[in-house]
Amino acid sequence: MKIDQKLLKNLFNDDSGQDLIEYALVAALLALSALAAMSPLANKIANEFNTVGNSL
């Protein structure tokens, strides 16, 4: 019975995967913000190429 309590206490206090989750959340946030910033920029670039193509 004492081993089970010790095992549960160790599992409850284990935070070894916490850093990985934090890095994954930061990477996901950066990816979403980059995607949101690039979408309007892609439209502007496409419009410029269309303007140049039409003038030729």
Image: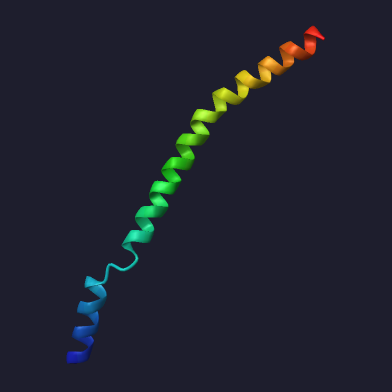
Please state, as top left, top right, bottom left or bottom right, where the C terminus lies in the image. Answer: top right
Left or right: 16 as drawn, with respect to 38:
left
Relative vertical location of residue 45 with respect to residue 15 in this rendering, above or below: above
Q: Nearer the viewer, residue 8 or 33?
A: 33
Please state, as top left, top right, bottom left or bottom right, where the N terminus lies in the image. Answer: bottom left
Q: Position of residue 15 (x, y in %)?
A: 27, 67
In the image, what residue occupies the spot 79% across and 10% down? 54
- Describe the colour scheme in one phrase: rainbow
Q: Position of residue 45 (x, y in %)?
A: 64, 21
Relative vertical location of residue 56 with respect to residue 45 in this rendering, above or below: above
> Looking at the image, which residue sits at the far top?
55
Left or right: 45 as drawn, with respect to 27:
right
In the image, what residue occupies the spot 23% across and 78% down? 10
Relative vertical location of residue 24 with respect to residue 3 in this rendering, above or below: above
> Looking at the image, which residue sits at the far right?
56
Q: Position of residue 19 (x, y in %)?
A: 33, 60
Q: Nearer the viewer, residue 20 or 10?
A: 20
In the image, what residue occupies the spot 35% across and 54% down? 22
- In the rendered picture of this protein, how many numbered marks are placed on residues? 0
In the image, what residue occupies the spot 39% across and 50% down? 25
Relative vertical location of residue 22 with respect to residue 48 in this rendering, above or below: below
